[in-house]
Image: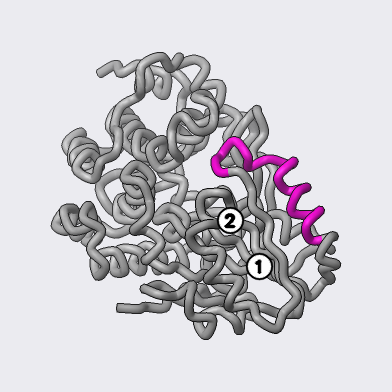
Amino acid sequence: MNLCVDVTLGERSYPIRIGRGQLADPASWRAAIGGRDVLVVTDATVAPLYLGHVLAGLDGLRHASLIRPDGEAHKTLAGVEAVFDALAALGANRDATVIALGGGVIGDLAGFAAACWMRGVAFVQMPTTLLAMVDSSVGGKTGVNLAAGKNLIGAFHQPNAVIADIDTLATLPPREYAAGIAEVVKYGAIGDAAFLAWLEAHADALGARDGDALVQAIATSCRHKAGVVARDEREQGERALLNFGHTFGHALEAEAGYGRLLHGEAVAIGMVLAARLSTRLGHAPAEDGERLATLLARLGLPTALPPGFDADRLLARMQLDKKNQSGRLRLILWSRPGSAAIVDGVEAAAIRDVLLGKP
């Protein structure tokens, strides 16, 4: 089963193609390449598996590849500079295309470099992880990390296409695969109670990587994100809802040191903490948060803070979050499954109590 979801942004609209055999079929993505120069950016884990498929589809074009080290720790300005150097060596002009072949780290890094090279060149997302397929590859948010926090430097730069080949998910380690499902669950939690119930009913199939269940889950997630992006491309309002669990999660990632916790793992914990904060502030019943935690645990995800995290240090990280305005903490909370809202002016003391596990 192959599906296509469209992101509707006027002249910058683009397709998300989801299914099997996409990377080895240039007919599904060659039209997204604008000029003759193409740089494929990938990482050391993905390159031996899939780079050959993509390069074979670039016959007749002037192309090169850049293989970066794997992992969140390498999503840095130094990594962006390496992409710039590769583009310069290729002699890439303004009609060049950058292909991001990999997970969210490669997509964010290559996309940000494409946004900057000659003030913006085309790029194509070829996500190879579930997390990237349903989240970072869609919507045009690109960026890199600083020691002070995650994604503090970046740009909005929409891709020409997203090519989600689910065959690549067969090679994902179990932990990486489960981390991607966290973002799938998020779409049900914030805006689609029926989808959340579908995930509960199909948790075993998703855990077994059933192809039809995966295509359906990815397509539903992408439809939700595409709709939000079309209505609020630059996160001035509704798009912030997509960050449910992320304020907690980004703080956890940064405090742990990038790599100890996978992004999806941190978001899973963050969603449970956001649900508990919602209950503490009187927005939602406790049983809904327990239901969410149960589903995440069934899908192989952590739902509690690992030992050794300091509540005050995490709170300080959260206060640096990009969603905050005028020094006031701004979080995404929910009132029930499928209904989330942006809440301004959340008291730091309430967040600290949740981090400490106080009832």
Which color mode does the image show? one colour
Question: Seen in the image, is 60 located left or right of residue 104?
Answer: right
Mark 2 touches mark 1? (CB < 8 Å): no
Question: Seen in the image, is 303 located left or right of residue 248?
Answer: left
Question: Seen in the image, is 335 located left or right of residue 22?
Answer: left
Q: Quadrant of residue 215?
A: bottom left
Does residue 131 appear in this view? Answer: yes
Q: Would you name the residue on which mark 1 appears?
A: 123
- Label 2's element? helix
Disc 2: CA contacts within 10 A as few (<14), some (14-19) or many (>=20): many
Q: Would you name the residue on which mark 2 appears?
A: 107
SS majority, magenta? helix
Q: Is residue 89 above or below residue 147?
A: below
Q: Is residue 44 above or below residue 325?
A: below
Q: Quadrant of the N terminus?
A: bottom left
Q: Which residues are magenta?
A: 70-87
Amino acid type, callout 2: Gly
